[in-house]
Image (cartoon, rainbow, N blue to C red):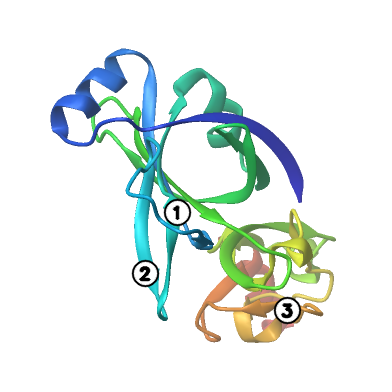
Amino acid sequence: MKTFDLNAEPRLELGKKSVKALRKEGKIPAVINGGTIVELPFNGTLKPGEKLVEIDDKRGIITTDVVVKNDDVRKLIYTPDIFEVNLNVNGETKKVVMKDLQFQPVKDTVLHIDFLEVYPDKPIVMEVPVKIEGHAEGVKAGGKLVMSMRKLKVKAAYTEIPERLVINVDHLGLGKSLAVGDLHYEGLELMNAKNAVVCAVQLTRAARGAAAKAAEA
């Protein structure tokens, strides 16, 4: 997985007014999920962007609400690639991946980003692009290769997740398809429905005509 360096600022204020002001400044509100609790004797003072939380009788602070600059995330968002992001907040670098994006439906501008903090020993689920390799037998026979899924959900430690899931289609014949259940990658668990079709070779008119002539001969 490629890496991407990104600076973030703690989000000082919450609410609709502050969100509008941030967006006018070319900034995007974001949240960091999955962070670990920092166990400290709480003295009643929190830094901007920090929250006091309690999980399993452990009390501590965690940074969740941040702001990033729109110009800084363009190469992270408008690409088919997936990245391990080195997110610098208050001088501390957190390793995160981008989990979700919210877009403005008309202008298509980014409204909000969800990051997930990752750890080498903790599996995550994320979508990975699919890359087709080879030349299908069915295409050679006049069929057309159709992609139904361009990304697959994968569960693994983030250090094991590849940039692409390569699928070889050399032996895919006319009218045949490859489903999620037909695919296997060492160290990765595919989370999509096993019967979901990833790609198929569809019969074209030319292929149907050739098959009909062959049957008549």
User: Residue placed at 55% from the left, 32% from the top?
Assistant: 90
Residue 89 horizontal side relative to residue 12, left or right: right
Disc 2, SS:
strand
Q: Which residue is mark 3?
A: 214
User: For the residue marked with disc 3, what is the amino acid?
Assistant: Ala
User: Residue placed at 76% from the left, 51% from the top?
Assistant: 1
User: For the residue marked with disc 1, what is the amino acid?
Assistant: Ile
Badge number at residue 54: 2
Q: Quadrant of residue 47?
A: top left
In the rendered image, residue 175, in percent from the top left (x then y), is placed at: 62, 77
Q: CA distance from mark 1 to mark 2?
A: 10 Å
As drawn, 141 above or below 215:
above
In the rendered image, residue 211, in percent from the top left (x then y), is placed at: 67, 76
Q: Between disc 1 and disc 2, whose residue precedes?
A: 2
User: Residue placed at 73% from the left, 63% from the top?
Assistant: 161
Q: Which mark is nearer the camera, 1 or 3?
A: 1
In the rendered image, residue 133, in percent from the top left (x then y), is placed at: 82, 59
Q: Which residue is mark 1?
A: 62
User: Residue placed at 27% from the left, 33% from the top?
Assistant: 104
Q: Quadrant of residue 50?
A: top left
Disc 3 crowd, CA 10 A, few/some/many (<14, 14-19, 20+): few
Q: Nearer the viewer, residue 168 or 183?
A: 183
Q: CA distance from mark 2 to mark 3?
A: 72 Å
In the rendered image, residue 83, in percent from the top left (x then y), is placed at: 67, 45
Residue 38 horizontal side relative to residue 185, left or right: left
Q: Nearer the viewer, residue 46 or 165?
A: 46
Asked if the residues shown at circle 1 and circle 3 are in contact, with their CB atoms under 8 angstroms apart, the answer is no
